[in-house]
Amino acid sequence: MPTLQIDKNFLNWAIQDGDNPVSQCALGCDAQSAETWKTKMATLRRETVQKPTIFIGMGTCGLGAGSHFTLAEIKKYLSEKGIDADIVEVGCIGLCVMEPLVDVQLPGRTRLMFQTVTKDKVTALLDAVFAGEVPKDIVMGQFRTTGLQPWDGVKFQDEHPFFGPQTRWVLKNCGVIDPAQLEEYLASGGYQGLRKILGADGKPAWDPMEVCLEVEKSGLRGRGGGGFPTGVKWKFARNNKDTHRYLVCNADEGDPGAFMDRAVIEGDPHRLLEGMAIAAYAIGAGKAYIYIRAEYPLAIARLEQAIADAKANNLLGEKILGSDFSLEMVIKKGAGAFVCGEETALIHSIEGKRGMPRPRPPFPAVSGLFGHPTIINNVETLANVPSLIKNGADWFASVGTAGSKGTKVFALSGKVSRTGLVEVAMGTTLREVVFSIGGGIARGKAYKAVQIGGPSGGCIPESHLDIEIDYESLKTVGAMMGSGGLVVMDEDNCMVDVAKFFMDFIQRESCGKCIPCREGTRRMLETLNRITRGRRHETGKQTLERFQSVVYLEHLAEVIRDTSLCGLGQTAPNPVLSTLRWFRHEYEAHVYDRICPAKACVDMIQYQITEKCTGCTLCARKCPADAIVGTAKNTHHIITDKCISCGACADSCRFHAIEKV
């Protein structure tokens, strides 16, 4: 693939903090070159543009919303109008629900962001902006840029309720820079952290153990779910007598509703590579793997390009930046097995074996990939490292709570008005994430719960919405941080059905190696299926089993949690335990009253025909079970014992005379 070769003097100048006159003097560059490079940096940061520039979100979420059609229409418009403009394809800025997102920046003016710019809106939008007008119905805000003229009557982006409360460190460049352009990452401060630890003239400025200690001092904890102190973990490997060490980035993002890793890689791949290079230097690894699921083709393409560009400019490969440190970077594609997110199963997969966990100890930091010390961190953990090293441990630790420092990225999805990717300071309340950033529950429905931490996490009810988001607080309510999936549920969600969904996922994804997880999750799923079925065709024995099911679930959950081999099995009962803890009344309604309060469990739904019925007979003709009786022009009735709860009658009724009970 073609690579970008950057002028070596400019590269060195940029990563030594090129806006700092001291760095310029240290490099011995002349004043004219320094001014030229400063101008180039300003251009790369879009502090000024020489001609109209149009940015379009081309991440996976944007493409799913049709941004490729929008892009084609923009190119067609510019060609037909004869307008000379730059088009920049950026990643996801986070507000996925408003895709396709298009930004426009004119010379001397600030950058404008517009939402839901589908193909049919392109012409009207560009006509207005090029005429100096702003379509107020789709504008989201303007970027703050010193020295540029702001647009009258348009709020700034950081005043938008979605972006305002966020603290964007990991997501700083996502949706802002072109992820395929190394120079743009350099202009945003990229690779300055790596240069800081490697020093200049081949002499490392920091001892590797100093890097470990700085990360430990910062309070950075693993963002993959466990929350283990990152610096401490690195020290385990660094202190190992075996000098053949590996670094692995776990990008095997398998939680339903989670897409943080994908978006970070698609929008800012060099941030991950820089973080990995720093981590590899700290632990003494000469080879690093990025384990990423093959279902992320765009993220993989971004990584391949970024690795090639980094190698071409001596930011990866042999003797990086003139130092004695060398690093080989390898992409390993996973087949999409959820269990391979567990570190020992991931190691087996890289080694070419079946992805199955093994007992620990020994931990991977002692004996991991190919039997050598191995550090495994997820994407977000490593993406935090460049800014941490560049700005210092104290800077990083200044944000967050006593035990949880920095920020956390969440994939906000479900029954919330503004779905997308958000990054907030540790200690932010769940209420602020859901109602301030997310805009509250969609369609005016009532909040019921948030599922946090994926299949291994738990549900948090309304009574705990003001809980602070950090590792310890979430455990007190039966949940966990997890990798960052955050699914919002409203009054129409049945919590028993939610538990059944996650248990079905876990049961299918179990590797089957240990009996508690393989068989225990199967029995839990069978029990949940039994209590969400109606009373039709139920035997006396099955009725007794139904009455005993709640106690049985609790007992079985404890056995699975205490005896499973790996983290997947040990946390598998969490969705059931947390819903039982906070929504036990819904389980009891299913078991004893044989009803689903949320009217979500199809087999338990009953229908009745109201007085609105005109006797048109359409419902009777549509019923596949012949469960509706009545004569023309007279109110019809449903025979409950024959009704199969398919809902065909309600769907066909033009008078809304059939309702769920």
Image: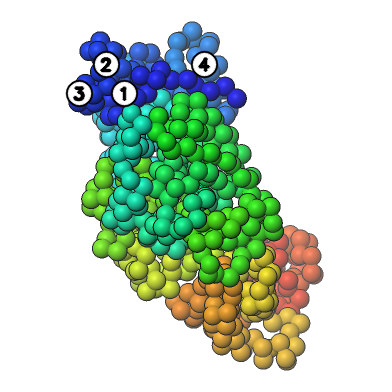
Q: Position of residue 208 (x, y in %)?
A: 36, 47
Most foreground residue, 129 or 512: 512
**Circle 2/circle 1 CB separation < 8 Å:** yes
Mark found first going from the N terminus, 2 or 1: 1
Question: Does any portion of residue 555 appear in the rendered image?
Answer: yes
- Residue that label 1 marks: 13
Residue type at tag 2: Cys
Mark 2 to mark 3 CA distance (whole Å): 10 Å
Residue type at tag 1: Trp
Residue type at tag 4: Tyr
- Residue that label 2 marks: 29
Mark found first going from the N terminus, 2 or 3: 3
Most foreground residue, 559 or 203: 203
Instruction: Please indicate whether residue 411 sits to the left or right of residue 591 in the image.
Output: left
Instruction: Please indicate whether residue 312 sits to the left or right of residue 370 in the image.
Output: left
Per the image, label 3 sits on a secondary structure element best described as helix
Mark 2 to mark 1 CA distance (whole Å): 9 Å
Question: Does any portion of residue 105 appear in the rendered image?
Answer: no
Per the image, label 2 sits on a secondary structure element best described as loop
Residue at the image position 79 percent from the left and 70 percent from the top: 626
- Residue that label 4 marks: 77
Mark 4 to mark 1 CA distance (whole Å): 39 Å
Mark 2 to mark 4 CA distance (whole Å): 44 Å
Mark found first going from the N terminus, 3 or 1: 1
Residue at the image position 54 percent from the left and 80 percent from the top: 562
Mark 4 to mark 3 CA distance (whole Å): 44 Å
Q: Position of residue 532 (x, y in %)?
A: 63, 76
